Amino acid sequence: MLTIYLTLMICTALPVIALQTGLGPEFLAWLVFALIVVKAMLLVDHFMEMRKAPRGWRLAAQAWAPVVVAVIAGFHAAS
């Protein structure tokens, strides 16, 4: 469980660190999109305890983040 906490903390701090190193806003946006998906998967599996849930329920709980990120990324790429 400690590994999950540390991974979530790193995923939260990584965009701030990347911003301070001077990376461009375009890269930061895509980094945040990727980290949202990673964090959502970890939260569903470990904190909602859906690792052993039926496949359909687990897929439904995990699918919302990639779908939302894909829609937002589509709007971001179009602008």
Image (spheres, helix red, strand yellow):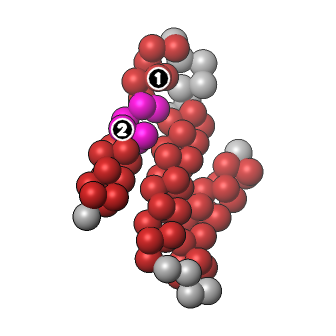
**Image quadrant for the N terminus?**
top right
Q: Residues within 10 Å of mark 2 (few under 14, many from 20)?
A: few
Picture quarter containing residue 21? bottom right
Q: Secondary structure at mark 1?
A: helix
Q: Is residue 9 magenta?
A: no
Picture quarter containing residue 45? top right
Q: Nearer the viewer, residue 49 or 10?
A: 10
Q: Nearer the viewer, residue 49 or 44?
A: 44
Main SS, magenta region, reads helix
Q: Residue at x 60, y 70 (%)?
A: 14
Q: CA distance from mark 2 to mark 1?
A: 12 Å
Residue 32 in view, yes or no: yes
Picture quarter containing residue 64? top left
Q: Secondary structure at mark 2?
A: helix
Residue 75 circle label: none
Residue 54 sits above or below residue 10 on the image: above
**Image quadrant for the C terminus?**
bottom left
Report x, y in % for residue 44.
Answer: 50, 36
Report x, y in % for residue 47.
Answer: 54, 39
Q: Residues within 10 Å of mark 1 (few under 14, many from 20)?
A: few
Please give the residue where the numbered disc 2 appears in the rendered image: 67
* Amino acid found under the numbered disc labelled 2: Val
Residue 29 sits above or below residue 3 on the image: below
Q: Residue at x 44, y 77 (%)?
A: 25
Q: Residue at x 60, y 79 (%)?
A: 17
Q: Residue at x 42, y 31 (%)?
A: 63
Report x, y in % for residue 31.
Answer: 52, 62
Q: Which residues are magenta?
A: 62-67
Residue 59 circle label: 1
User: Would residue 71 appear left or right of 50 to someone viewing this image?
Assistant: left
User: Would residue 52 appear left or right of 40 to someone viewing this image?
Assistant: right
